[in-house]
Amino acid sequence: MGILIRLVITAVSLWIATLVIDGIQLTADTAASKAGTLLAVAVIFGLINAILRPIIKTIGCGFYVLTLGLVAILVNGLLLLLTSWIAGKLELGFHVDGVIAAILGALLVGVVSWVLNMLVPDGDD
């Protein structure tokens, strides 16, 4: 159940990013297709983060230390850009235009996800 809640939170965060940031588009016709697209993109984003983030952190540990963790902002943006590329290959209506939009989108998705995760109990309490 916790995974589904986090999936929905990520989808909501991505939806907010499409509303706020000009370089992130969600091109679907109906509300149901938009929701389905956002859930599919949230799954892709979650899988990419689960698989690639630990590898990148391990390999780039020196860069994380050298930049006091600021390189994580760039890495998160690039992972969102990769998510957009995969969504395009799967013909999903989600697209990120450029690195700047990806970085801003990743920051927004991270902040909104953090806030929503704080508001939703995870069942461990």
Image: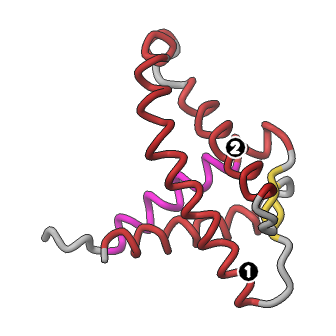
Q: Where in the figure is residue 17, as x and y percent of width and height?
A: 69, 61
| Magenta region, residue range | 105-120
Proximity of marks 1 and 2: CB atoms separated by less than 8 Å:
no
Question: How many residues crowd mark 1 within 10 Å: few (<14), some (14–19), many (20+)?
Answer: some
Numbered disc 1: secondary structure: helix
Please identify the residue farthest to the front as the structure is shown: 90
Residue 81 horizontal side relative to residue 14, left or right: right
Q: Residue at left 63%, top 47%?
A: 106
In front: 75, or 104?
A: 75
Q: In this view, does 74 lie above or below 46?
A: above
Q: Which mark is residue 82?
A: 2
Q: Name the residue under label 1.
A: 34
> Which one is earlier in the sequence, the residue at label 1 or at label 2?
1
Q: Is residue 105 above or below residue 98?
A: below
- Is residue 119 on the magenta stretch? yes
Question: How many residues crowd mark 2 within 10 Å: few (<14), some (14–19), many (20+)?
Answer: some
Q: Residue at left 50%, top 52%?
A: 47
